[in-house]
Amino acid sequence: MFVFILLSIVVTEVNNLIARATKLRPKNLRKNINRIIDDPVIQAKVYTHPLIQLVKADPIAPSRRISEREASRIANGAVSSVDFIDAKTFVDVVLTTIKAESDQQLFGSLLNVIDGMPAGPERRGLRAMVNRIVTTGQGMGDLRKALPYVQDRRYRSALSEIVNQIDEEVSLLGVEPSSNVALMAGIKQIESQNLRNSLATVMYSAGSWDAARQNLETWFSNSMSRASDDYKARMKLSSVVVALFFALALNIDTLNIARTLWEDPARREQISSQLDYSVQSGELQSQVDVTQPGGDDEFRANQAQPANELEDALGTGVEIANQLQVIEELRLPIGWTVQNASGAPDMLSDPNNLWNYFPANNPDGWLGLLAVKFLGIAATVIAAAQGAPFWFGIVNRVLRR
């Protein structure tokens, strides 16, 4: 178990190094968001929004029109280091992006007329009503009731005409006047049928604006749960590959190690004492904690990025080398040798001697050695892939008895 913990720490450090170098978390996050937002224009505007910044590109104003080709290039560009997006922030950005152009089309003229009115309580009141409509989708009825009381006949006539035009456009869209008309209009203009249908279903099934927002946040959170599961699966596969590499390269054979410890009580007692000291001193606990900052099975707020990524990578490399040195210092049957054993029959059964695995060198015993070695390496890989916290927990329970 001590060897499994040390090797698991090495595997996790290598995985973290690979994940940081390849920006695996941000790429996985973008991949899963692409599943729910499959419209490239909305993707580009959301990904470059100052509150998101998932890709390295200048922000695109929600109301700005861009081609689908340009949007695809931006959305699929280089990712930043962001690996977590809060559900509420994501929903705010998406809704703002979707309804920005519709707000301008439906209410732009109305606001222009109001802004042209003389300063005073009347203009402030009308402006507040329109802002409420734009923000919450509520208040068109109050605005209609207020228009007959506008003192200047010119402004009253202009505002009434624009409100009638808005009502006509809303009726053509097939949207309920009491709903957030700008948002529903924006949803109807989305090119992607899947995204359009999904958002429309969420909005229509909600009894209120707050309920609709909650539904959208739940929709996004569920998608992020799938993203977390995808990332965990990829890291598990990576753990198996990395563990297999080190197990083969260093010849960390569980069966051979177990047999050696079984037959050598002195060495077993020495390693047991070393393990007990590492646990009691807290040294092993700190090493396990460092390699597992928050768990690979969930997305979380991005950790502060190192000022020098190369320096950070070198530091991780030093930690990996230190762990491998600790494994080597256990003086267990780890590592390969290449020695001609043709003149020494007793050496033909040595599982650490590569020479013995060639049929021409060891015709009677190579297959049996290979089968046992396969089982020993496989056991090491499976054990190391479980992670250091798994084995550390077992060791802690054993030592407390």
Image (spheres, rainbow, N blue to C red):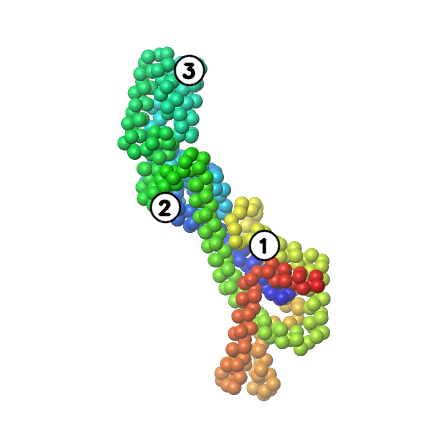
* CB-based contact (under 8 Å), mark 1 and mark 3: no
Q: Earlier in the sequence, mark 3 or mark 2?
A: 2
Residue at image position (49%, 42%) is: 86
Q: Quadrant of residue 381?
A: bottom right
Q: Amino acid at mark 2?
A: Asp
In three-dimensional space, the C-alpha distance between marks 1 and 2, rounded to whole angstroms, equals 33 Å
> Is there any visible trace of residue 37 in the rendered image?
yes
Residue assigned mark 1: 292
Across and down, in percent, residue 374 comes to: 52, 74
Task: Name the mark on residue 38.
Answer: 2
Residue closer to the observer: 130 or 231: 130
Q: Left or right of 148: which side holds 14?
A: right
Work out which quarter of the rendered image holds the C terminus and state it.
bottom right
In three-dimensional space, the C-alpha distance between marks 1 and 3, rounded to whole angstroms, equals 60 Å
Find the residue positioned furthest to the front: 207
* CB-based contact (under 8 Å), mark 3 and mark 2: no
